Image (cartoon, rainbow, N blue to C red):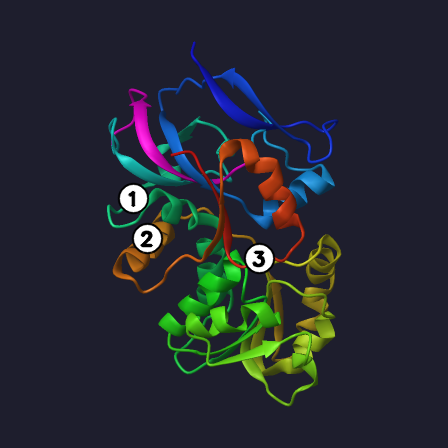
Amino acid sequence: MGKMKAVVYNKKGSPEKLIYCEMDKPVPKNNEALIKVHAVSLNAADYRSMKAGIIIPKKGIFGSDISGSIESVGKNIKLFKPGDEVIGYLARYGFGGLAEYVTAPEKALIAKPSQISFVQGASLPMAGLTALQALRDKGNIQKGYKVLIVGSAGGVGTFAVQLAKYFGAEVTGVCSSKNIQQTKSLGADEVIDYAQEDFSKKQNHYNLILGINGNYPLLDYKRTLAPGGVFVMIGGSLSQIFKSLIFGGILSFGSKKMKSMMAKSNKTDLEMLSKLMEKGSIKPVIERLYSLNQSAEAMNYLSKGHASGKLVISLE
């Protein structure tokens, strides 16, 4: 059995609890492919899981969003062969992306378009799927909708702005002053600097609001919805997420609906997003690149909550 470099979660590790080390290279089962990882992106869900000490991957290796090339395949794999370039979303299949190699079933993988780099491909899965499913499935976005995206500068927010414009909406982003120009460049019609202005105090009302970041009370969101509008809680602190789960149903009496969501693994949706990226309809915003042995540093930076786009670990 060969060896590989990986970044493993160690609860007693200090200070970041992520240890760069050598471990056994995984062996694919009959229904799995072995992937040589070229890039893996980090998500807020990673550091929230670490902080809470829950949903820790079985082997202690985080990283759900990967791109790479097929090294070998199990005998039941039909869609891929060695050498194929893929994008994978491994959140439901054990994670494992922060390593030189990872195994995954076919249903976790799509073919990577040649026009998309490995770094771009790794930026897409969780953030892109979250933005798409929040807007389309939870928010039932329609052409002409007025959409407010609170937290328009992070990984999910940057994709959400672009996808909302793709669906024909009028988009307002909420972010810090340093990210105003970035949000405008992605197509937002208006941008609110949260340090200068409170969106909930304005007289504007929206058909759809995505709450990605920001410590705003649920009642502020509801008050800002237009009649028949939908609020979707995506991120925020753990306390915000729990409040949304507990009180969302109570606050949904009447025409205004309060919802929460987590991205679902969906191969068709991921293929759709990759085609939009291939055509240039959406583009990833990648703030920083790190090497694998800098993963703890990258996770620490992400946990501060001020990343302007995606953080990607490149193994190329």
Q: Please name the residue that numbered disc 2 is placed on.
A: 274
State whether residue 266 is above or below residue 71: below
Crowding near the residue tagged with mark 3, few <14, some 14–19, many ≥20 C-alpha atoms within 10 Å: some
Q: CA distance from mark 3 to mark 2?
A: 22 Å
Tell me the residue at 49%/40% (across/down).
64
Q: CA distance from mark 3 to mark 1?
A: 26 Å
234 is higher (above) or lower (below) than 180 = above
Whether tag 3 and tag 2 are in contact, CB under 8 A, the answer is: no
Between label 3 and label 1, give the one nearer the viewer.
1
On-image quarter of the C terminus? top left
Q: Is residue 94 visible?
A: no
Q: Closest to the observer: 237 or 140?
A: 237
Kindly identify the amino acid type of the residue bearing the numbered disc 2.
Ser
> Which residue appears at 59% of the width and 66% of the height?
151
Query: Which of the two discs, 3 and 1, labels the residue nearer the N terminus?
Result: 1
State the residue in front, 156 or 296: 296
- Nearest to N terminus: mark 2 or mark 1: 1
Q: Which mark is residue 112?
A: 1
Residue where numbered disc 3 is placed: 261
| Disc 2/disc 1 C-alpha distance (Å) | 8 Å
In the image as oriented, which residue stretches furthest toward the bottom? 203
Categorize mark 1 by other alpha carbons within 10 Å: few (<14), some (14-19), many (20+).
many
Q: Earlier in the sequence, mark 3 or mark 2?
A: 3
Q: Residue 162 occupies which quadrant of the picture?
A: bottom left
x 67%, y 77%: residue: 222
